[in-house]
Image (cartoon, rainbow, N blue to C red):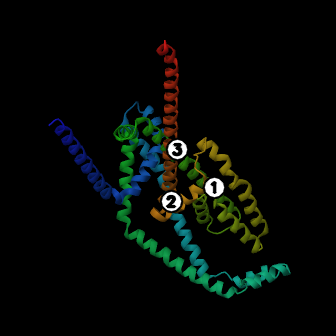
């Protein structure tokens, strides 16, 4: 009879945990359609928390006006310019594809001009590789342009038909961001208290998470935007058509480690040299090498202050894996998961080291106390 209350309490606790797991799973399924807006709202609230605190001081501690004013500033200074740039990029992409369809690049003439200037050894290597059959490449390029035009048109129609869903997700993100700006710190403390993990470990994980978010967005996102802007200005000075489009593509590539913005400015500079625009090509290549590429080394220490501790090869793999899994959001989600994964294992290793050190000290103390009592026992 003495064990009956304990077994009942264990059964009740197990039942509660099962109910909690089922309800949490159902909640995740229901919220899943808005997972990406919620993700970006949370990341934005973390990044713009200093702005909210500054506004909060200016409005004398009134949290609702501070959150609303912060959201208005974010909307005007960030979201409106982003929407304008996106519309310009789509317009330039459509114009570029239409121009290439109407006036296709004559690869045969371009190839002959380059081929005749090559040394004999290089020409023999080109002949053996099969690249001399430029007609098939030209045909494939025209097919690719047709497919690109169709894809852009299809995406435009898809965006138009899904406008309601887009604006709904956008509205949800703004609405959630308002409350995360206002109550983010309090929500964070509540979650840390509720997580069934030792509080010191939970605090360290939260600290690592915030550090990774700031490093990923400030040290990668801001640097990518700067490199894209520098690339846009460089290509515009060089007279490259659709410079804004290529600048945005450069910013996207800059988000991916190893590949970087050079995936755009290097081919652009070489193309200008091949087509006879010598000073423009040299200008793009030199500016890309000395200014665009160097901006990463200059800005990242200023914005982040310290390294995230994530190796570049892990960031590359998780970024590409995140993109393939959840789309564009994977650029941020992949490194975040990698950072939390490494941080969790690092904390586990530190905890084991502490436990082993504690056991070792206890053994030393026991041995010391045993030796100290031996003479008195003998006496």
Circle 1 sits in a helix, a strand or a loop, which is it? helix
**Above/below status of 16 relative to 85:** above
Q: Name the residue under label 3.
A: 346
The CA span between labels 1 and 3 is 33 Å
In the displayed image of the protein, which residue is found farthest to the front? 378
219 to the left or right of 199: right
Q: Which residue is drawn at 61% across and 54% down?
A: 312
Circle 3 sits in a helix, a strand or a loop, which is it? helix
> Considering the image in quadrants, where does the N terminus appear?
top left
Numbered circle sitting on residue 227: 1
Q: Nearer the viewer, residue 12 or 189?
A: 12
Which mark is in front, 3 or 2? Answer: 3
Tell me, yes or no, whether the two marked residues, 1 and 3, touch with CB atoms within 8 Å.
Answer: no
**Looking at the picture, how far across and down is residue 307, in whole percent?**
60, 44
Numbered circle sitting on residue 237: none
128 to the left or right of 366: right
**Above/below status of 289 relative to 4:** below
**Above/below status of 111 relative to 59:** below
Q: Nearer the viewer, residue 246 or 239?
A: 246
Tell me, yes or no, whether the two marked residues, 3 and 2, touch with CB atoms within 8 Å.
Answer: no
Decide which of tag 3 and tag 2 comes sooner along the chain: 2
Q: Which residue is drawn at 40% across and 69% down?
A: 160
How many badges with numbers are in the image? 3
Circle 2 sits in a helix, a strand or a loop, which is it? helix
In the displayed image of the protein, which residue is found farthest to the left? 1
**Looking at the picture, how far across and down is residue 324, in whole percent?**
49, 65
The CA span between labels 3 and 2 is 43 Å
Decide which of tag 1 and tag 3 comes sooner along the chain: 1
Numbered circle sitting on residue 84: 2
Q: Nearer the viewer, residue 376 or 17?
A: 376
């Amino acid at each position: 009879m003495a064990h009956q209350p304990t077994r009942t309490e264990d059964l009740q606790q197990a039942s509660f945990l099962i109910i909690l797991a089922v309800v949490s799973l159902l909640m995740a399924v229901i919220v899943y359609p808005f997972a990406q807006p919620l993700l970006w709202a949370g990341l934005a609230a973390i990044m713009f928390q200093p702005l909210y605190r500054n506004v909060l001081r200016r409005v004398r501690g009134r949290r609702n006006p501070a959150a609303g004013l912060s959201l208005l500033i974010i909307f005007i200074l960030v979201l409106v310019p982003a929407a304008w740039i996106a519309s310009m990029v789509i317009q330039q992409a459509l114009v570029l594809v239409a121009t290439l369809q109407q006036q296709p690049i004559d690869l045969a003439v371009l190839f002959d001009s380059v081929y005749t200037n090559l040394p004999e050894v290089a020409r023999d290597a080109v002949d053996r590789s099969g690249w001399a059959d430029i007609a098939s490449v030209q045909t494939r390029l025209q097919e690719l342009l047709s497919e690109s035009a169709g894809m852009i048109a299809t995406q435009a129609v898809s965006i138009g038909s899904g406008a309601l869903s887009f604006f709904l997700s956008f509205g949800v993100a703004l609405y959630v961001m308002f409350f995360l700006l206002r109550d983010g710190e309090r929500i964070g403390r509540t979650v840390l208290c509720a997580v069934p993990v030792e509080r010191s470990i939970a605090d360290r994980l939260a600290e690592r998470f915030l550090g990774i978010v700031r490093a990923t967005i400030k040290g990668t996102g801001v640097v990518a935007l700067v490199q894209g802007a520098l690339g846009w200005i460089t290509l515009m000075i060089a007279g490259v058509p659709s410079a804004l489009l290529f600048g945005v593509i450069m910013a996207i590539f800059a988000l991916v480690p190893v590949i970087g913005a050079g995936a755009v400015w290097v081919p652009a500079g070489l193309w200008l040299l091949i087509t006879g625009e010598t000073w423009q090509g040299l200008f793009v290549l030199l500016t890309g090498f000395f200014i665009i590429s160097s901006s990463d080394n200059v800005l990242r220490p200023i914005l982040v202050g310290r390294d995230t501790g994530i190796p570049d090869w892990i960031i590359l793999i998780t970024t590409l894996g995140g993109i393939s899994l959840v789309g564009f959001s994977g650029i941020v989600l992949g490194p975040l998961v990698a950072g939390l994964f490494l941080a969790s294992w690092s904390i586990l290793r530190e905890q084991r080291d502490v436990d082993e050190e504690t056991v070792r000290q206890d053994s030393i103390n026991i041995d010391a106390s045993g030796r100290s009592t031996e003479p008195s026992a003998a006496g």
